[in-house]
Amino acid sequence: TRWLSLGFTRIQPSEIMKIGIPMTVAWYFQRYEGRLKWIHYIVALVLILVPVALILKQPDLGTAALIMASGIFVIFFAGLPWKAIFAAIIAFVAALPLLWNYGMHDYQKTRVLTLLDPTKDPLGAGYHIIQSMIAIGSGGVWGKGWLNGTQTHLDYIPESTTDFIFAVFGEEFGLIGNILLLLVYLIILARGLWIAAQAQSLYSRTLAGALTMTFFCYAFVNMGMVSGILPVVGVPLPLVSYGGTATLSIMVMLALLMGIANEHKNRRRNADNDDLTESEE
C-alpha cells in the first residue's frame, strides 16, 4: 500500500525510506570503518534491496529506483572500487531484456514507449507529456507571468501542483525562471557535496553525499519527466511540489546536512581552542 491512513493524516512510508536507507547503510559501514571487505558491500546491498522489493510490490517502480539509488550512493561514497561499478553497469544493461519481459507491468512498459513517441497516443498515455511540453514551450523566455499560465489554469496539465509543477513554473516564469531554479538546485548540490567532503567521520561523509545526490536525483528525474526526456513517474520536485510526507522528508534531509556541517564547525572550533590553550600554557 503506497499510502497509510493514520486517521488524522495520511503518510507515504516509501518517502521516509529515502532517508532511512542511507542512514542505515552509512551506520553499517561506520561499524567496519578501515576494514571494509567485499562481504560488507554485499550485506549493504541486501539492506537496500529488502525495502526496495517491498516498494516494487506496491507497485511503484519510479520511487523504488530512486530509493535504491539513495542507498547505492552510500556504497559509492564508502569507496566501492570502480571495477565493481563498471561490472554492475554492464550486468544491469545485460539484464534489461529480462526486466522488460518479466519485471515490468504493462503500464510501466507503456510509459517507456510513450517516452519514445508520445504522439502515438496523444489523448491517452502521451497526453501528460505533450501538454507539459506545450506549457513549458509556451512560456518562452520570460514566461506569461504569475498565475497567467493558460495551460495550467485551463486544466490541461494534470497533477499541476505535484508531479507536473515544473511545467507550471516553466509556463509562468519562462526560460529565465527555469535557469534560476536550476541555479538554486546546483547551489544546494555544491554545498551538500562540500559538506560531505569536509565531514569528519565515514558515517557523516557517506550520509551527506548520499542525501545530496538523492536530492539531485529527485530534481533531475522530475524535470526530465516533465520535459519529455525521462518516463513519467510519480516523483515530486523538491521544495516546489505540494506535498506532505515528500516535503517533510526533503526538509529532514536538508536538516541532516546542516547538522553534519555544524558538527564539522564545532570540531574545528574545539581544535582551535585546544591549540590556543596549549600555546598559552
Image: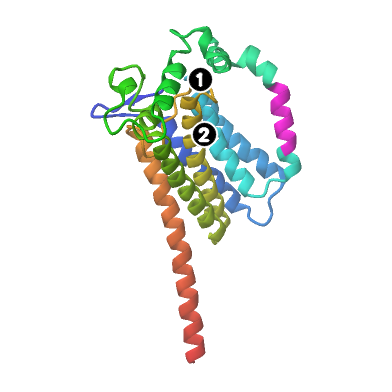
Asked if 269 appears above or below 203 in the picture, the reply is below
What residue sits right under mark 1 in the picture? 57
Give residue 67's mark. 2
Asked if 192 appears above or below 218 in the picture, the reply is below
Bounds of the magenta segment: 86-95
Asked if 101 appears above or below 170 in the picture, the reply is above
Question: Is disc 2 placed on a helix, strand or loop?
Answer: helix
Residue occupying image coordinates x 51% and y 25%: 62
Question: Is disc 1 placed on a helix, strand or loop?
Answer: loop
Real-space Cα separation, disc 1 to disc 2, in angstroms: 14 Å
Q: Nearer the viewer, residue 50 or 206?
A: 206
The answer to which image quadrant residue 139 occupies is top left
Residue 89 is a magenta residue: yes
Categorize mark 1 by other alpha carbons within 10 Å: few (<14), some (14-19), many (20+). few
Residue occupying image coordinates x 42% and y 33%: 15
Sequence order check, earlier mark of 1 and 2: 1
Asked if 108 appears above or below 188 in the picture, the reply is above
Q: Nearer the viewer, residue 264 or 46?
A: 264
